[in-house]
Amino acid sequence: MTLKLTLIALFLPLFPLSMVQNLILARLRAPIVRAALLLLWPQLGVALLYTLQPQIPAFIVTWALLSAGFYALRLLTVRDLGLWAAFLASSALALSWGLAVRGVDVTTLRLFVFWFSLPAALLVLLTGPLVRRLGAAYAGLFTGIVERQPRLAVVLTAVVLSTIATPPFPGFFALLDLLRGLGNAAAVGVLGVWLLWGWAATRILQGFVAGSGREIVAPDLAKSSMLTYTAVLAVLVAVGLQFTGGGL
Amino acid sequence: MDKLTILLPAIPLLSAVIISLFAGGQRRRVARISTGFSTLTLLVAIATLALYLRHPQPTQVWLGASWGSLYLDPLACIMALGVAGISLVVHAYSARYMAEESGYTRFYLLLDLMAASILLMVTAGDLVTLLVAWHLIGVLLYFMLGHDTRRATAQRYAFWTFFTYRLGDLPLILAAVLLYQAYGTSSLPLLFERIAAAPDPHTVFGLPLMTTVGLLIALAGFARSAQFPLHTWLPYTMEGPTPVSALMHAGIVNAGGFIINRFAPVFVHSGDALHVVFAVGLVTAILGSVLMLTQNDIKKALGYSTMGQMGFMFVECGVGAFSLAVYHLIAHGLFKGTLFLSAGGVIGDARKHDGVPHDEVYTFVVERRPVASRMPWVVAAIITVVVPVALLALSHWLVGGRFVQQQGAVILLFFGWVTGAQVLFATYRLRAESPWKTMALIILSLIVVVAGYTVIEHAFDLFLYPDRALSERIFVAASIPLATFEILVAILTVATVAGWLAAYYTNAKRGKGDGRPSALRLAFYSLISREFYIADIYAWLTQTVLGLSQRLNVWSRWV
């Protein structure tokens, strides 16, 4: 593991270097800054990768898979939405090494990390309205928001689905593209990680959206905010369909 | 034709968009719009089938450059018609049934999206479109089953279903990737052509490619169609709204049979996978039926009944009778959908009056009153054994003499004979007022059922697999060495006859013992009542994984 690779692995996060990103995210309070960091941090890693052009050893795919699996497993018991988004990003972005080893062009890799970091950033942004309304963006604390804040519930659900690579969001096609170029054993590993994401998503959603929960009087997400989130997600889908080419 | 194909998934999708944007949350308007579009979908499905029958040539329509194609072949036509029909019934039924529930618009939105996804799945013309639809069905079903967001049990079982479906999604994705890597195309017709030309270009995981792919597709089907041991979610999905149960048991759960039929050209080269399908289906059919018999909750009994039926469907696939599986899934969808949708009405009526006709069947089964006379047992035994064989053999011979030469057909005939014989045996035990008349009526019913089933199944086979060579090659792929086959049939025969004798002996002995069941019997009963502890094992595994996750988070201080 050279110094160059270590530096890149800090930004295209591989455990334990990924802890740096998560530590910074945990220290930052403003959702917009955290979202910006989630978007820019991995792009910096891609830029470094193509500038420094290090020799990438084959074992790094195994390391990346273990790192992705480690965060996916930990995701299952995370209840703080901001932390959940950070862990999901750590898990998904580690998989980008599978493409890096394949020697894909810079645009493909930039798009791959973007398809996963944008939904994670949106999720971090959603912690803002949740904290303002409920006091904390913490699953299980105030459940049943679909009854009292239906717009917020719909947006939260859609964004969570986009983070776990549900079709037609581009993450789905990006993962298909990744699987196409991996060896069979590594592909099985990626599918295992994907399975854990789905499990974690249902746990986090049930902690917010479902349940009767404690009564709390709080306004729903503004229509304009909902439209903004919807528009961003729609553009993400449209651009994803345009650029991923279906993955296979 | 091309436009109609596109309209099939597009109409329900359009309905979803319209009711979420323009219906303004008005319940009656939402139901009317959605049901109206659903009717239109059914009409388009009928028109598509009619046009296909006039010009029986499969067509593929591409909406995108590399994926997003729709493929209209006999399987897609017939499945689309079934799905559109069941979807319309569920739409119409839900208008009043869901009237008191919250989230009415959300329910119809999900229903429309589900119909669009299923129609997209059955008409998918490439691997990516198929995967997208397959994946979306699982996600949408999760939200539909968890529609009542206040009930913790609904959420729990919605999660079980979602997780099992995800387990089934992943093998299908891997199968698609392997196929794409090997043949360089995602288009299904082109893929099948290339497979026919070069079935096994290399090995994967130490097995021939087609065997691996066949097993992966079968695994995807097992999860979706509740095959043992991936069945635990099915009986508990009754926590969802009744229309969702009907839609699921009548349509979604049948996806396993569809996916195996869709990839028939793969299974032609994957006999080993078909044997696994047969074994899993047989175990599922037996366990599903046993569990159904021991339930005291009618809805769970229905759930296990579906599990048993799905097992039979996979047995049919496993012996190579692919078209019979499609016929089975449509027939099962219709009768199970009817059962679910009429369950509420039946329960309501039963509270007022039982409505059971007090005829000889009622007096025998419910009141257990011995009546009148029996026919001589020798005559009954001869009829029991001979009539089903004669009926089944004759009807199959009539539609196609060569069919009965296939091993798979022999196994199906064997099952048919066992079922028919048990019906006739029950008639003998009935002690009817006029046993000859009752026996004659039951034989007549059996003739209608067997002849009807045989002729329809034969017509189905000709329609779904016009390439007769492909149909025969599937049977050949599913066959096993003759000596092994004969030994298996002999074992099955002995087991069946032994089962009958044991049942007869137990029945004859009833009331003569001290009334206390043996320890072995109690252990068996507790095993069944705990549903073979499968759900407990899963719950333990879940808690173990969650505990590990928690410990890892604590250890790494949540960063």
Image (cartoon, rainbow, N blue to C red):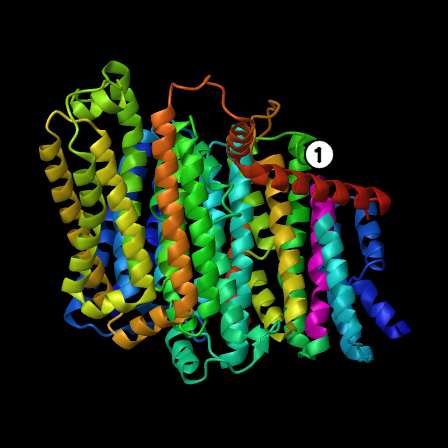
User: What secondary structure prevails in the magenta region?
Assistant: helix
Placement of the N terminus of chain A among the 4 image quadrants: bottom right
**Which stretch did the figure color magenta?**
A74-100
Q: Is residue B111 visible?
A: no
Give the image location of residue B203, x and y in percent.
58, 77
Foreground pick, B353 / B513:
B513
Is A75 contained in the magenta span? yes
Is B142 on the left-hand or right-hand side of B479?
A: right
Report if residue B531 lies within the magenta region: no
Query: Which residue is more in the foreground, A41 or B455?
Result: B455
> In the rendered image, which quarter is residue A9 located in?
bottom right
User: What residue did someone put label 1 on?
Assistant: A136
* Residue B95 visible, this orientation: yes
Identify which residue, A109 or B291, lies in the foreground.
B291
When the figure is inspected, residue B112 is found, relative to residue B274, above or below; the finding is above
Query: How far from the left and from the top, in percent, is residue B343?
Result: 30, 30
Residue B387 in the image: above or below residue B530: below
Chain ID, mark 1: A
Count numbered badges in the picture.
Answer: 1
- Considering every residue shown, the one lying at the far top of the view is B352
| Left or right placement of residue B460 versus residue B133 in this view | left
Q: Position of residue B538 (x, y in %)?
A: 61, 42
Q: Residue at position x 38%, y 62% from top?
A: B486
Identity of the residue drawn at 60% across and 28% down = A218
Q: Position of residue B345 (x, y in %)?
A: 27, 26
Q: Does residue B367 lie above or below A142 as drawn?
A: above
**In percent of the image, x 58 and y 37: which residue is there?**
B533
Give amino acid for label 1: Ala
Within 10 Å of the Cα at label 1, are there few (<14), some (14-19), or many (20+) other Cα atoms? Answer: some
**As drawn, B151 above or below B400:** above
